[in-house]
Amino acid sequence: MSTAPGDGAPDAPESAAEEATTPGPFDQLAPTTLVLVRHGVTPHTTGRRFSGGLGGDNPALSEEGRAQVGETARWLVDLRDQVDAVIASPVRRTRETADIIAAELDLPVEEEAGFAEMEFGEWDGLTFSEVARRDQAGLDRWFSDMAAAPPGGESFVAVQERVLAALERVLETHAGRTVVVTSHVTPIKVLTAHALAAPLDSIFRLELAPAAVSTIAFHHDPRSGARTPSLRFFNALPPGRRTLRDTGRW
C-alpha cells in the first residue's frame, strides 16, 4: 500500500530493487515534504517574455493564471490536514498564487525571498528574439556558462546558492512537516536538479507548466543528520488539466 504525496510518510517499496534505493529505514523521522507550485500565467508568460523577480516589471497573474491556480488550489485541498504552512516567493505573481492556495487550505502565507525568480536585469520584459537582436553574445554566454549573468541580473549559480540556502531555512523551520511553496520555473528546476543530484545545467532539459505541482520529500536520518531528497513527482497538473497540449509555454 502506498500513501498520498505529502502525507508525511514515504511510499512503501513495491519491489526489492525499489526498497534498496528507498531513502533510509521506515523508522526514521517523518520527512519534510515540499509541495512546489509554479505560479499561473501572467501577460509575460503568454508573451514568452523574460520575467524575473522583484527587480523587473513584476506582473500580476492574468485571469487565465488565476483560474489555473484556482484549479490547483482545489486539488491541494486533499492535503489540508497535512500542510503545515504556505510559503511564497515575495514576487507579485507567486504571492497571488500563494494567497489563492492559502485561502483554500485556511492557512496564512509566509514569504521566503530565496525562492524568488532569477533577476534578468536588462533582459526583463523582453522576448528571446528581442534579446538575441540586442545581445546575442550575452545570450550565448548565458546558455553555455552557468556562472554568466544577464547585464544587471543574476547567474544560474547565484540563483542556485540562494535557493538552496532558502531550502535549508525551510527544512529547519518546518522539519518533519509538509509545506506548500509557491515559486517560479528556475527555483523549482534548481530544487529538482538538487534532489536528483543532477548537474545544474540539467535545468535546461526540464519543462514546467503554469500552476503545476512538483513534490520533493527530504528524509532525515537522526543518526547521521543527513537529509536524503526523494522526488515524488514533477510537473503534475490537476485532473482537469492533464492534457498533452498543456505544455509549459516557457
Image (cartoon, rainbow, N blue to C red):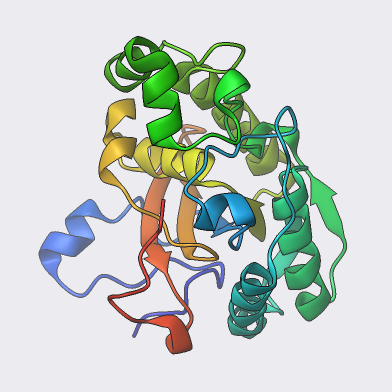
In this view, 209 is above or below 157: below
Q: Residue at x 62, y 12 (%)?
A: 152
Tell whether 120 sits left or right of 10.
right
In this view, 111 is above or below 37: above
Q: Position of residue 238 (x, y in %)?
A: 48, 81
Q: Position of residue 91 (x, y in %)?
A: 74, 43
Tell whether 33 sits left or right of 20.
right
Any part of residue 85 in sight:
no
Q: Residue at x 50, y 16 (%)?
A: 150
Tell whether 170 sits left or right of 138.
right
In this view, 3 is above or below 134: below
Quadrant housing the N terminus: bottom left
Report the front residue among 137 and 4: 137
Q: Residue at x 77, y 71 (%)?
A: 100
Report the front residue among 246 and 174: 246
Q: In the orientation shown, which residue stands out farthest toward the right?
A: 108
In this view, 48 is above or below 107: above
Any part of residue 196 in sight:
yes
Q: Quadrant of residue 142?
A: top left
Q: Position of residue 50 (x, y in %)?
A: 53, 37
Q: Position of residue 107 (x, y in %)?
A: 84, 69
Count of all numbered marks drawn on residues in the image? 0
Q: Quadrant of residue 145?
A: top left
Q: Residue at x 65, y 78 (%)?
A: 67
Q: In the orientation shown, which residue stands out farthest toward the bottom?
A: 240
